[in-house]
Amino acid sequence: MTHESTAVGLASAYSNATTASGDWWRDAVIYQVYVRSFADSDGDGIGDLRGVRSRLPHLARLGVDAVWLTPFYVSPQADGGYDVADYRAVDPLFGDLADADELVRAAHELGLRVIVDVVPNHTSEQHPWFRAALAGEPGARERYLFRRGRGADGSLPPNDWESIFGGPAWTRVADGEWYLHLFAPEQPDLDWTHPEVTAEFDSVLRFWLDLGVDGFRIDVAHGMVKADGLPDIGRGAQATLIGTEPLPFFDQDGVHEIHRAWRRLLDSYEGARIGVAEAWAPSSERLALYVRPDELHQAFNFRFLNCPWDPGAMRTVIDESLSATTAVGAPTTWVLSNHDVVRHVTRYGGGAQGLARARAAAMLMLSLPGSAYLYQGEELGLPEVADLPPESRQDPAFRRGRRQQIPVPSVDPAPGPGPAAPGIIAPRPGEPTPPQSAPSPHSQPESGAGPQPRACCVPQTQAGAGPGPDPLTAPQAHAPTRPQTEAGTGPQAQACCGPQADLLTAPQAHGPTRPQAETGTGPQAQAGTGPQAEPGAGPAPEPCTAPQAHGPTRPQAETGTGAQPQACCGPQAQAGTGPEAEPGAGPAPEPCTAPQAHAPTRPQAETGTGAQPQACCGPQAVRGAGPEAEMGGGAGGDPLTAPEADGQDGLRDGCRVPIPWAGAEPPYGFGPVGSWLPQPPEWAGLSVAAQTGDPHSTLELYRAALELRRAMPGLGAPEAGPSPDPRGMRWLPSPDGVLLFTRPGFACTLNTRPEPVELPAPGRPVLSSAPVETDGRTVRLPPDSCTWWAF
């Protein structure tokens, strides 16, 4: 039995069993689609709804439960569609309303639910309401937050609030009044005390629910209500305080009445429609208020995303998150990446180490109680693209940081720390544009790019699938690309060559990232080259050998480029054996990184682009530390300065580069020609086609993990009812640097150390992010790895 056929069968059976459940969202795996970067159907270089619909089978095969679509409404695109001009129409850039309807129907036919974004904190400046406000229509300004300025002539902003994107949060209009925009000036904040605002959004939600969507992700769900009187904060760098300290413009108690009203509206529809809060709160307890029984169903848990690669910190975040949500009867959510943060391969250090940690972190996330969110491309192990040319960037924080500012005096001229001097945004018509420069040649490959890691298959009895061989994989954290010898390529590197059938085999998951490391360069490096058979072709497992530049595509195989494509010994393992093979691109060189305790936040380099590689993170890992923030500066790949006023650095485009589907060169099947952001040339080996069928790729690791999550009773949401531990989860003693917990019939180990660790085997290994060695009594956990166990 092949792993691929086993995964499809289990996923299909489980989906049919759970689709009808009213609590589907409690343990759902939800896949975020950034529409403009997913798939382009019409050749304009921008992803669209028809493109998304054409790729839905990939998501069904991956094994997710729902799709979350970023905004596709009519918008000037000042902030990637989060500046909405018409909430009931599809922007022609992405299609039309018929395309949206067809996408929802197609997703439902595949057993996928559809969640769409709603943006209630602000509109576009091109929204009819705001145009009326600027035109002086009576009462129109009452829907927004217009105020008179301070000072004798009103030339100073009404308060000291700063925009998340940098600079003051106020812009002055021609008659001297100021309007509030917590994000870009093109995104004026609404006044949610006005009854027309609440009535309008009730109508908007009903419009899309009537079309058939299954729920909403609520953008800036913590921001619609501001503190009475709009009081000063009294300090600068306010974006860095979001999610850590109380602020008068976020997480006010008044937002909860809005969410209660929306919960009543959602509950009035059949089919368990849900609301998901994108909410930043200074504590897990405050965040849990958004998911009380009469409020929203889920809230994003950004503390897990921001957690450093440290077992103590991880355990604290997990315990506090579960405790807070359990107290209100809600599921916890877990997320590692999204369209606003640096991809976690790069946050975790980039290169071999970053990919190993990212794979392990994904397995940890998928083993925890509750619901998980995946960001498009993370199932491919995509890194951040740090060297985008300035002229291609579209992040509004990037542009605003370089817009002309008209300085005005500070309210308090006293020296000392405080908010940046306010300014008036110069009129947009004729404003200077960012300096143009030649496109980056991508001469420095992104950390983690290149061929996918490989590992080997283990014949196991699939949980819930009855007896029989189960070739679940133990993918390897990194496919080395240099011709030196990998650490651990002596006798110890031969995993699983003996009689132990349950061992997960392959070269060591983590080796040095500098001038060591290529597996398969000597006789010891080829693990398991004896008489064992290929998984699915006989009774014993076949350990894998050297990394492969391209995995076989569905029934066809890709053509390799030299000795590297040698894969697991067996008639189906060799790349390039099919008549319709795609030319391989070969392994790409890989920049070496050495993680640091803190990610640089201003002029330092992004991971993989210079001498200041970034590790995971803490709150500083998110650029600007705000809800739209990302990590890192950019002197290495993008030597541009950060925006003023300690807002975001404007480099979010690096996580939004269109994903690769197939082919040896850009746009890798994204569309007929080109893409709105340039894709790195080394992404050929990371495409869906290159990784499909390769049991050691990151894609197949995700597929196997989601398959097991569906099949093993102890995973997903804990069962309802009284229990000594309502989470169904219990921590066990473990060595320093290792996390070990159990759930019913299941155990998870995470080794965060840079060297192997031995401990008693907690069960029978069923999946690992890197190869493990065990004799059934003890186990040797590879560095930076996660392993799942059944017992």
Image: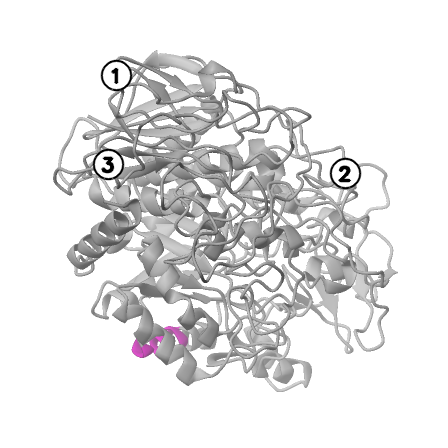
Q: Are marks 1 and 3 in contact (CB under 8 Å)?
A: no
Sequence-wise, the earlier of marks 1 and 3 is: 3
Q: Are marks 2 and 1 in contact (CB under 8 Å)?
A: no
Sequence-wise, the earlier of marks 3 and 2 is: 3
Q: Viewer-proximal residue, 336 or 752?
A: 752
Residue that carries the numbered disc 1 in the rendered image = 776
Q: Quadrant of the N terminus?
A: top left
The magenta segment is: 202-211
Label 3 Cα crowd, 10 Å radius (few <14 / some 14-19 / many 20+): few
Report the residue at 30% width, 56% height from top.
Answer: 65
Say which of marks 3 and 2 sits in front. Answer: 3
State the count of labels. 3
Give the residue type that dot 1 points to: Gly
Residue that carries the numbered disc 3 in the rendered image = 538
Disc 1 secondary structure class: loop
Q: Could you say where residue 595 lies in the image, as x and y percent from the top left?
A: 64, 28
Q: Could you say where residue 152 lies in the image, as x and y percent from the top left?
A: 83, 63
Q: Could you say where residue 589 lies in the image, as x and y percent from the top left?
A: 67, 41
**Label ID, residue 604:** 2
Disc 3 secondary structure class: loop
For the residues marked 2 and 1, what is the alpha-carbon distance in whole angstroms? 47 Å
Q: Are marks 3 and 2 in contact (CB under 8 Å)?
A: no
Residue 122 against residue 488 in the figure, above or below: below
Instruction: Please indicate whether residue 391 sits to the left or right of residue 760 in the image.
Output: right
